[in-house]
Image (tube, helix red, strand yellow):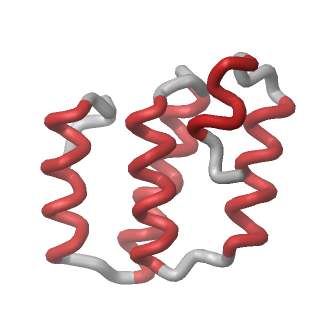
Amino acid sequence: RLALTFVFANKEHRRFVVAQKISPELVTKELALCDKCHTYDSRNFHCWNYRRWLAQLGGVDSKAELEYSLKRINEGFPQERRIKHSLL
């Protein structure tokens, strides 16, 4: 099982592994993992970037991703990161 943390080295390794094994089930699991990480720290920009990459790779509906981003922003996302790292 891959680590829950999203730091640069882990994120790049995760991208490599996921790109090799991409499937709708894996995308769903990875998005759930990102959601869990954002529960702990909504400012984790490595996780935001990974989620954006994953959504593009997996063909996730942009409207659903926009709703997710707005939900996280409205939960108290710090101002300096709102525009830079959200999916807006």
Q: Residue at x 72, y 47 (%)?
A: 69
From the top left corner, tell me how far across and down residue 40 is, in percent: 54, 22
User: 4 and 80: which one is in front?
Assistant: 80
Relative image position of residue 58 (x, y in whole percent)? 44, 77
Of residues 22 and 50, which is closer to you in this image? Answer: 50
Q: Relative to 23, is 63 on the left or the right?
A: right
**Horizontally, is 6 left or right of 38 in the view?**
left
Residue drawn at x 80%, y 57% is 67
Residue 50 location in percent, x, y? 40, 50
Query: In the picture shown, does residue 50 fall above or below 17?
Result: above
57 left or right of 35? left
Q: Name the image quarter holding residue 21.
A: bottom left
Identify whether 48 is placed above or below 54: above
Give the percent coordinates (x, y) of residue 20.
15, 76
Instruction: State the residue in front, 30 or 69.
Output: 69
Residue drawn at (52%, 53%), measured in percent from left and top?
32
Q: Quadrant of residue 15?
A: bottom left
Q: Is residue 6 left or right of residue 45?
A: left
Q: Is residue 14 above or below residue 65?
A: above
- The number of discs equals 0
Residue pictured at 27% horizontal, 29% vertical? 7
